Amino acid sequence: MASPETESLEAECLCGSIHFTFDIPVASLPLSVYLCHCSICRHATGAPAVFHSVLPKNTTPNFIPPSTERNLTSFKPAEDCTYDFCSTCGCHVAGVSFDRREWTIATSMFKDHGPEKFKIISHVFSKSGPGSAIPAVVSNIDGREIKHWNPPDDDPRAKVNKPTAEAGPTGEDRLRAQCYCGGVSFTFGRPNGEVRNDTFMSKYVSHRDKNKWLAVYDVCDDCRLANGTHVAGWTFVPLMLCDPPIKTDLKIGTARTYASSSGVLRSFCGTCGATVMYSCAARMPTEEQTVVDIATGILRCPEGVMGEDWLTWRAGLAFEEAGVRYDKGFHQALRDGMKAWSEEKYGEALTMTIEQ
């Protein structure tokens, strides 16, 4: 229970299986938030970055029934903590010490992310995501500089593992999509003639380069609560180009699925929690023409995390109004930054329509 010296902050994932409060000392507010761009966080969530806050030791969640800690799945990505996520919808919840007394919480699932509660102060491991737009373009929020922290170059944590380019049996380019634990792993190809000549599937091919796919940052509430991060990165690819073959149930390897609304299916790794895919009825005119969203955080792009050799990024955020409503300062900075990024990369702020 909160007291005059504490304030109760409430959080809930998309499906509601994880629903709790933390009682935070008023003197500790706003909680400092950092964006982590390390490969573990990207590949274990499927997102471009995670939004984390280290809570005071022994500050543990008060679960609101019927929610319970048993609804979490724990994955051990390192020697000192687990990554916990909702077993039902895949929402990244926290990094937790083995004794369960220290929580580094995903702030994006809190109901109120206003400046009185949370304050984004830094990017960490920004060099671990070479070429990433977010640490480059979100350099200040509401006039405050957002600092960067990276380990020294001679620190083993500073090593960046560059993915290897892949090719199919006839030498064609393939791009690997793989979660952190490797339980979900597949490749897909570039737009081929069948896709480019199809009236539906061709809508997701870059208008600037017919060998690339469209991509966008999505800041809608549902993706935020399914990922546990402010921002989801998506690219749009026909299922028919995936290898090994993936059916419309999105089941591959260790993937679990969650039907978040009518006609919508989301998949995530049941072992490490990474968001993998999103599908909806509107992108399934026939089974053969099914186009799915693939989380860009699991792409293993040799040229950098934006996959610029494979993807053309829209400047505008998807569902921008939802993002601004949730965290005005960050999303306005991201909106303005992506416009500038697009103008620098493409000579204009790309405004392609992405069929929903």
Image (cartoon, rainbow, N blue to C red):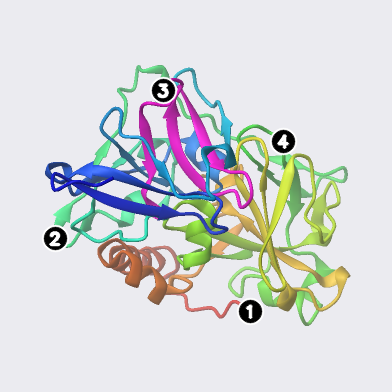
Please name the residue that numbered disc 4 is placed on: 183
| Mark seen at residue 355 | 1
> Who is closer to the viewer here, 21 or 86?
21
Q: Nearer the viewer's eye, disc 4 or disc 2?
A: 4
> Who is closer to the viewer here, 4 or 163?
4
Sequence-wise, which precedes: disc 1 or disc 3? Answer: 3
**Residue found at x 25% / y 64%:** 329
Task: Tell me the amino acid under the disc marked 4.
Answer: Gly
Distance (Cα) linking label 3 and label 4: 24 Å
Quarter-wise, where is residue 80 in the image? top left
Please name the residue that numbered disc 2 is placed on: 143
Q: In the rendered view, does 290 fall on the left or right side of 103?
A: right
Task: Tell me the amino acid under the disc marked 1.
Answer: Glu
Quarter-wise, where is residue 211 in the image? bottom right
**Residue 126 % position (x, y):** 36, 40
Sequence-wise, which precedes: disc 4 or disc 2? Answer: 2
Q: Please, what secondary structure does the residue beneath circle 3 have?
A: helix
Q: Quadrant of the C terminus?
A: bottom right
Is residue 206 placed above or below 48 in the rendered structure?
below
Please name the residue that numbered disc 3 is placed on: 157
**Residue found at x 72% / y 41%:** 184
Q: Please, what secondary structure does the residue beneath circle 2 have?
A: loop
Contact (CB < 8 A) between labels 3 and 2? Answer: no
**Residue found at x 58% / y 42%:** 71
